[in-house]
Image (cartoon, coloured by chain):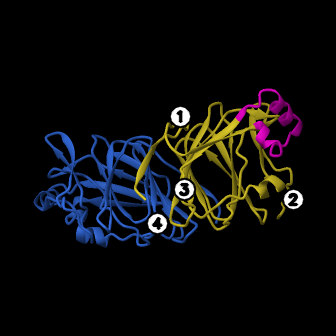
Chain colours: A blue, B yellow
Amino acid sequence: MHPFRSDIDFQSGAMSRGVLRTRRVSDMLDYFADKGAAREAAEDRDPLVYQYTTIDLPEESGHVLHGMTTIYPGLVGREYYMTKGHYHRERAAGEVYLCLSGLGKLVMEREDGETAVLDMEPGTACYVPPYWAHRACNVGEKPLVFFASFPGHAGHDYGTVEQYGFANRVENHGGKTVVIDPMPEGRGL
Amino acid sequence: MHPFRSDIDFQSGAMSRGVLRTRRVSDMLDYFADKGAAREAAEDRDPLVYQYTTIDLPEESGHVLHGMTTIYPGLVGREYYMTKGHYHRERAAGEVYLCLSGLGKLVMEREDGETAVLDMEPGTACYVPPYWAHRACNVGEKPLVFFASFPGHAGHDYGTVEQYGFANRVENHGGKTVVIDPMPEGRGL
């Protein structure tokens, strides 16, 4: 394979090559806590929640998959716009996020019930170690834009999060950002 | 391992955690084409050519090693300040560079003699596929700052470049940046 470059706009997250995918509220009805608010938004304008671009590379160990994610500002009920979130199919694969614009929370958890939250702002490099599911939430007023890089063999497992959700949810309570855990007793999957 | 973040200054390349290493001209006497100019600079002020910070992570497949590099502006003879450059010890491991500030050239080559050069400027994500040695050169007037990410098991082989050099050199000829190949017939190692 020959070396190549792609050009990124740090404010919008646009990338000059790669495969662009979009997620609207209607694609995420099972992910938001307030199902009624989600259904209503989907039936009304069905707004774009996030989009991401991934460079098309072989999904093999040794390759470095990379791409851009843009999460728009907004709420579904009290919950901030967020990515679906996923484990890697290969659980022993990590990921690094470099935040380029906006404000976010990176919510993570392990199958043994451990949880973690990191703040994202321009210049933060957040490391998601192997075994941690990860989801980003936009808690600011402009798009949250970040660069992500992960091993070629990582793969994606969205199903586990779709079925069990994340322990921590990031919500706006009267203008304040709060991370709430609806299952404070902890849980393992 | 628990998730963590580090904070990066995009203008200077400073990183709030990790291991900082510096390379002065005296560390690179065998790398610059003009050995006399290199010796002279090393004996005079011995300027800093570049520095890099790498987050301390296990060097294992699945981890995503990452860090920052800052190459200062300057010349040794006609040759721009640059990194030593390296192959990965595990040849089948790639790397991605995200340029955050400054102007550069990313010079690459394979052991079969293939060469490639990519321009680096703020917002360019350059992909170094498996099997390509890589070196960055600062061709601008401010520090060249970039984020790099590569597989945990990649390892570094500096010896091959130290012994054979790079086919392409990036020089300033009367104010113009030129990429010259002193062995235009091509070569394999």
For the residues labelled 1 and 2, the Cα–Cα distance comes to 39 Å
In the image, A38 versus B155, the foreground residue is B155
Q: Which mark is residue A93?
A: 4
For the residues labelled 3 and 1, the Cα–Cα distance comes to 21 Å
Amino acid at dot 2:
Glu
Q: Which residues are magenta?
A: B25-48
Of the numbered discs 3 and 2, the one sitting upstream in the chain is: 3
In reply to whether residue B45 is colored magenta, the answer given is yes
Residue B37 in picture, x, y percent from top left: 85, 34
Which residue is disc 2 drawn over?
Answer: B185
- Quadrant including the C terminus of chain A: bottom left
In the image, B163 versus A52, the foreground residue is B163
**Labels 1 & 4 near each other (Cβ < 8 A):** no
Left or right of B54 on screen, residue B159:
right
Amino acid at dot 3:
Leu
Which residue is disc 1 drawn over?
Answer: B11
**Labels 4 & 3 near each other (Cβ < 8 A):** no
